[in-house]
Amino acid sequence: MIRNLIGSEWRLPAQDARSLPVYNPATAEVIEHVPLSDAREVDAAVRAAAETFGAWSRTAVMDRVRLMFRFKALLEDHFEELAALVTRHHGKTLDEARGEVRRGIEVVDFACGAPTLLQGRTLRDVSGGVDQDLYRYPVGVCAGIPPFNFPVMIPLWMFPLAVVAGNTFILKPSDRTPLGGARLAELFLEAGFPPGVLNVIHGAAGTVDALLEHPGISAISFVGSAPVAQHVYTEAAAHGKRVQALGGAKNHIVVMPDADPAVAVPAILNSAFGNAGERCLSGSVAVAVGSAADVLLDPLRDAATKLVVGPGDQEGVQVGPLIRAEHRDRVAAYVATGVAEGAELVVDGRREMSRRGFFLGPTILDRVTSQMSVGREEIFGPVLSIARAATLDDAIAQANASALGNMATIFTQSGRAGREFRERVEAGMAGINVPIAQPFAFFPFSGWKGSFFGDLHVHGMDGVEFYTRKKVVVTRW
Ligand code: NAD
């Protein structure tokens, strides 16, 4: 059983605590159990974090950052081990896991800039003999609730920036991929951070609700599905907390007739099938404008059929398993519904379902419309829908018809089309000739519309704003 970290103590919840199995999705074997902590455990974690907050928030920024540099060095030392851990309990390929760990470490790099990031502002002689100074203060005890699909990267979006700003933190890792957060916490303690600065509490919905309701928590960072993001936003706000809640996605890839197929085809495959489609930045619907479909369809079909499906730790594998059998079956049900709704099945990955483990291969549906559930709802699996549009206007309208607005990207050789798309597409992250428009750590990450509930996005200066509150001091001597 994985243990919670409360202060300096790795401990199991009370004896009556229920637990869930943690799987290796490539083999369907149970490799661990994760406890479902209740309100008492949450309260113990909040007390540990609150007791540490006073001293930690007054620790000099340079001392906080020195520890963060040590944590960063440990993450580099354990880079391969962390990637293997991600593959083992999430299923993605080792290369994808390495990419995840690297993007997570980049947020730690960013957090190491705290002496610059946390600076305030000043204006002398705002009126005769009066000065005004703006200082940033930590907000208190913060909590982070990541999803299953990036067990190392998404926790690193949250706590490094929070703690360099002087907050203390409670991480509630995903109940399906809890090992990443647990290992990060071990390395964090090894770096020398005082006990109580980072606490880890395992569990699922009940544990999250206890965090949302606890009066000792000031801020909640959430990343997960849209319905849960909305619930977290509403409940946390009702309990007086600041919240950033990033939700689900239904991302469109617009392909103009002038796009270079040698660029667009591999990019679409990467976007739709990388991470087995379990990515909030995955391209889900490719909208082919005009004659683009004629050029794309055959190469996409041929290349998707050749992608190697298998356990993520095997050399040469390009598409790993899905997270759970139930999720794989849900994705397979979407494929059947798409066909029933009139889509044409071009590549059927359901043949991979007979393997041991939770596999479903790359699947392509053609002639999908935004009226079909496959064209409208988040599938979160390796299913690419192809839709047709007569013009760029039509393609942008199709993307904007989605209730979600996480990412959208366009492939074109026309600067005018690219600019038009950038200006009019309703998504928080937009790409031009890139498969995945992921902002680097020093820019904010988040979607728009139903993909995001809150004001301040994660990392970048938005992250600094989220984890600090401002005090303005007016002085006359
Ligand atoms: P999820 O919403 O099921 O779970 C997210 C977290 O909330 C987990 O820690 C889980 O334990 C907890 N949780 C689950 N159900 C809950 C409930 N009813 N009440 C309170 N807490 C609950 O999401 P997931 O399946 O782990 O992750 C996949 C989803 O996350 C997809 O929809 C994906 O698009 C989204 N996602 C979004 C982003 C983004 O940046 N917008 C990034 C990654 C993933």
Image (cartoon, grey):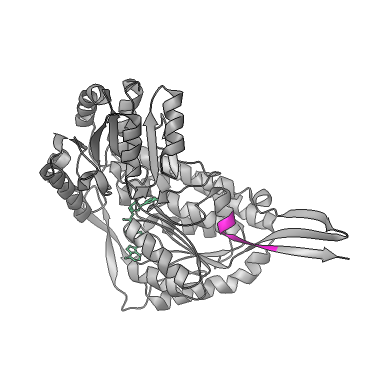
| Residue 308, quarter of picture | top left
Q: Quadrant of the N terminus?
A: bottom left
Q: Quadrant of the C terminus?
A: bottom right
Picture coordinates of residue 86 (x, y %)?
A: 36, 48
Question: For the point 55% across and 47% down, which residue is it?
Answer: 460
The one of 80 and 444 positioned closer to us in this rendering: 444
The one of 261 and 415 positioned closer to us in this rendering: 415
Look at the image and tell me whether residue 295 can be seen: yes
Does 376 sit left or right of 426 as displayed? left
Quadrant of the displayed image that contains ligand 1: bottom left
Question: For the point 16% across and 47% down, which residue is it?
Answer: 332
Residues shaded magenta: 465-471
| Residue 266, quarter of picture | top left
Does 331 sit left or right of 100 as displayed? left
Image: 445 above or below 142: above
Question: For the point 20% across and 24% down, which residue is it?
Answer: 298
Look at the image and tell me whether residue 315 can be seen: no
Picture coordinates of residue 312 (x, y %)?
A: 29, 41
Image: 364 above or below 355: above
Picture coordinates of residue 428 (x, y %)?
A: 44, 45
Q: Tell me, yes or no, whether the highlighted magenta stretch contains residue 467.
A: yes
